[in-house]
Image (spheres, rainbow, N blue to C red):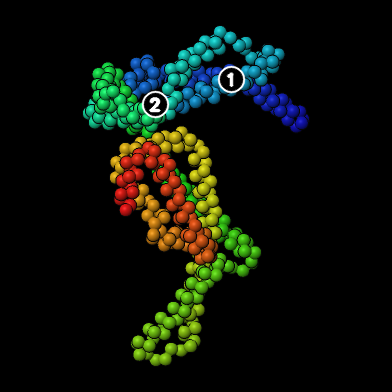
Amino acid sequence: MNNSIFRQKMSHFLQAAYRWYLLTPERSLDEAYKAALQIKAIEDKHFNGNKISPDLAIYSSSVMDYFQSDLDKQLKTIKIRLKEFQVSRSVVAASIEKNREKLGLENIDSSLILQRLRYIDDIREKYTKSENYEETTQTNIPPQTIVQVESEILRDKRQKTSNRSLSNQKRGKTNTTGVLPRSIFNTISRLQIELDPNSEEDIVQNFRKSQRRTIISVRFILLLIIIPVLTHQLSKAFLIGPVVDKFGLLERLRGSEEEILFVNTEMQEEALFELQHFEEKITFEHLIRDAEPLLQEKLEAEMEAEAQKIARKYHKQSANAIKNVFADLLSVIALIIYLVLSKKEIAVIKDFFDNIVYGLSDSAKAFIIILFTDIFVGFHSPHGWEVILEGVSRHWGLPANHSFIFLFIATFPVILDTIFKYWIFRYLNRISPSAVATYHNMNE
């Protein structure tokens, strides 16, 4: 009796699962159609039936970000569900016609499917031309801001024109002079830009791109710092720390059953020095008080208590060093994953730094280069590298190998200095020779 009931339930379950399998194309198309209806509802309610764009409505940047996130979500749903519709329809097409009537499913209305597909395509076509990362989330700009950036845009265009003329001059000696002064052509180009009826729109668009690029770059830099630090602290506090403390991972890694207090000999020497300093301190304090002679038993008791305190301190440091190794490994993995998933942000931040560097004056460029080189490859840089390497060794519980540190200081700054000089000679000298001349003058 129980077996028959079980077989009957299994039969109903399998039949329901098969029905769900056969209805996958219709279900996917229905979800894509609902997402398109959601986009259309936002257009009708907030944008007067037009495309969701900051150019067609007056909203703040936060409101536009809300609409844009909702739009991206619905477009992603449409893309995924249409792909699922195509794949599932090709897979279950043969099974649908044979088993639809047996399972009591209604016939598919092909006209309804075509109607929904056309509707979805009409919605998607509005946004296929605006998939550029910087143009999909533009913000409204107040009129006074346009006036502030107009001169900067015109200056950039004149600089590009000047750079093109300079590159043409380098192609041959016959192009070193012209019939008319170059300033006349620059003035004509500036007048053309100012008289162009679309120049104001171009200025607004360029500023919106610049603003969006700045926001993305600052957010990317902050996340580049926050993600590794947060991963390190959380994993160390809630994952790695409890595992190391509970299972005695430090002792297992060293292959010992006894409690390990020191992961290297330097820690042991530091603990011994602290204990000797404590003994000398007690003796000195007793002598300057003019008290009775210090009993050996009392001295040994105080020394034993201090030794236990020092032992607990260095055991905690040793366990903390092991935790740092695994926490840093997880932080590096999290950082790599974030960088892999942020290809668009990396391209944006590269453009952001290029604009910053090109916008600096020659003296500012030379000042930054001198400051950077003096810190890392200058006369006083070996002391800084020594502190950094010793700090890293202590962070991971490794003994500070002074031979390796001195070898590193003798080679790495020299290699870094050579790379700087080659970059200045090969790259900076080509794009900004005046900055290189200023750098040499300041360095002398």
26 to 168, vertically: above or below: above
Check if mark 2's residue and mark 1's residue have beta carbons within 8 Å. no
Q: Residue at x 53, y 18 (%)?
A: 30
State whether residue 320 appears in this view: no
28 to 331, vertically: above or below: above
- At label 1, the amino acid type is Phe
Query: In the image as oriented, which residue stretches furthest toward the front?
Result: 174
Residue labelled with disc 1: 85
Please name which of the two marks, 2 or 1, marks the residue nearer to the observer.
Answer: 2
**Mark 2 crowd level (few <14, some 14–19, many ≥20, 10 Å Cα):** some
CA distance separating discs 2 and 1: 30 Å
* Image quarter in which the N terminus is found: top right
- At label 2, the amino acid type is Glu
In what element is the residue under mark 2?
loop
Image x and y of residue 293, in percent = 42, 91
Q: Is residue 168 left or right of residue 74?
A: left
Query: In the image as oriented, which residue stretches furthest toward the bottom?
Result: 292
Report how many numbered discs are placed on residues in the image: 2
Image x and y of residue 79, in percent = 52, 23
Q: Nearer the viewer, residue 171 or 249?
A: 171
Residue labelled with disc 2: 135
Image x and y of residue 226, in percent = 43, 46
